[in-house]
């Protein structure tokens, strides 16, 4: 069996879009990352070196770049149940700063984005148009509903559409966005669910088109998250994934690490935004981190929600092209 996956990744500044037929391959995990192996199966193992610091009379394991890159700071900081603890912190971030922060307006969405058109994505992967556009859609991690609105408008013949998110505050915005876009009551409008991506099976449905943009890399267990989605994909279905690039976000990761150290590993996002802006002001103009921020992100990061999502996220795992492909290969045993 092969799985058709539409992958969008930002790698070294290059926007790559491809449809892959991936053969089965064994992998093993070393130092928190995936490497090709002749062995069959998946053997988890993690060796962590932590940078400890004193904060409020307690030692906080914040982690240094290599460990953070492999498993995410949230997982390093977790004491007991990593999934529960990290998910709670991620929910806290997006309740404080619902994301994405695009304004809600009356009327239909402007523009066209081929990634959220099932017809376009299907043709890209298979080389021909689908037999039917009467599809079932899942938007996993819909946030404030920006992508959900695109998915509704670009797939008008969809017969069912579920959208889920961990943040109740983000979902409030998503529902308002759908109402003001005149989508409520239409079959192609999203049914919004306040739930974890891990629990998607509770919806008891399989989908032709699964969209998951900017979500899986924020999970404490991206492999478990990917598997949960793939188990809900119909045979021949399309999954659209967007994850972060390890190379393209190098400077971002360094600032994330600095702010985590300064905050002692705590997740006070409002204070963290104020602290982060002061750190940027204090950096010399020649700083690589400050230069990259000015060149690429400064306009977006004028909004606190975007700044917090970029520099204060409690959990993030970034990918290279090889580790991306090997991560996808962990679900090749599924009949999808």
Image: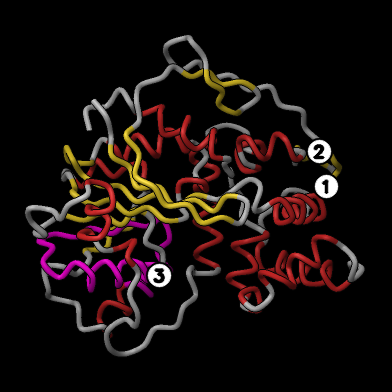
Q: Which element type, helix, strand or loop, lies under badge 3?
A: loop
Residue tagged 3: 144
> What is the crowding at mark 1: few (fewer than 14 residues within 10 Å), some, or many (at least 20)?
some
Indicate left or right for 191 with 12 as reference. left
Indicate left or right for 228 with 277 as reference. left
Please report the residue visible at 48 percent of the width from the left and 68 percent of the height from the top: 99
Q: Which element type, helix, strand or loop, lies under badge 2?
A: strand
**Percent position of residue 9, x then y:** 49, 51
Q: Earlier in the sequence, mark 1 or mark 3?
A: 1
Residue tagged 2: 59
Residue 332 lies in the magenta-colored region? no
Check residue 55 in the rendering and tell me which mark sits there, or answer none: 1
**Magenta highlight range:** 145-174
Quarter occupied by residue 139: bottom left
Please report the residue visible at 40 percent of the width from the left and 28 percent of the height from the top: 329
Q: Earlier in the sequence, mark 2 or mark 3?
A: 2
Q: Residue furthest top?
A: 39
Q: Which is nearer the eye, 96 or 63?
A: 63
Which marked residue is nearer to the observer: mark 2 or mark 3? 3
Residue 171 lies in the magenta-colored region? yes
Q: How is the image coloured?
A: secondary structure
**Percent position of residue 71, x then y:** 60, 36
């Amino acid at each position: 069996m092969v799985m058709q996956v539409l992958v969008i990744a930002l790698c070294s500044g290059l926007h790559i879009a491809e449809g892959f037929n991936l053969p089965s391959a064994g992998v093993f995990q070393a130092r928190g990352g995936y490497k090709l192996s002749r062995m069959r199966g998946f053997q988890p193992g993690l060796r962590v070196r932590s940078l400890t610091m004193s904060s409020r009379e307690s030692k906080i394991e914040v982690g240094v770049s290599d460990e953070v890159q492999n498993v995410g700071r949230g997982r390093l900081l977790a004491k007991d149940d990593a999934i529960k603890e990290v998910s709670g912190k991620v929910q806290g971030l997006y309740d404080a700063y619902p994301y994405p922060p695009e304004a809600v307006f009356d009327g239909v969405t402007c523009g066209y984005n081929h990634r959220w058109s099932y017809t376009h994505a299907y043709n890209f992967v298979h080389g021909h148009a689908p037999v039917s556009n009467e599809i079932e859609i899942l938007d996993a991690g819909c946030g404030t509903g920006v992508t959900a609105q695109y998915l509704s408008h670009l797939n008008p013949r969809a017969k069912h559409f579920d959208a889920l998110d961990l943040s109740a505050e983000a979902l409030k915005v998503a529902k308002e966005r759908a109402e003001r876009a005149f989508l409520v009551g239409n079959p192609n409008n999203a049914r919004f669910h306040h739930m974890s991506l891990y629990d998607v099976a509770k919806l008891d449905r399989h989908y032709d088109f699964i969209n998951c943009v900017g979500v899986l890399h924020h999970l404490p267990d991206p492999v478990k998250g990917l598997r949960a989605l793939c188990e809900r994909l119909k045979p021949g279905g399309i999954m659209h994934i967007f994850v972060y690039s390890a190379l393209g976000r190098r400077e971002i990761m360094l600032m994330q690490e600095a702010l985590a150290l300064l905050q002692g590993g705590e997740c006070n996002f409002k204070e963290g935004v104020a602290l982060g802006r002061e750190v940027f002001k204090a950096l010399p103009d020649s700083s690589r981190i400050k230069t990259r921020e000015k060149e690429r992100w400064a306009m977006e990061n004028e909004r606190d929600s975007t700044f917090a999502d970029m520099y204060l996220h409690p959990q993030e795992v970034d990918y290279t092209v090889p580790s991306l492909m090997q991560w996808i290969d962990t679900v090749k045993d599924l009949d999808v």
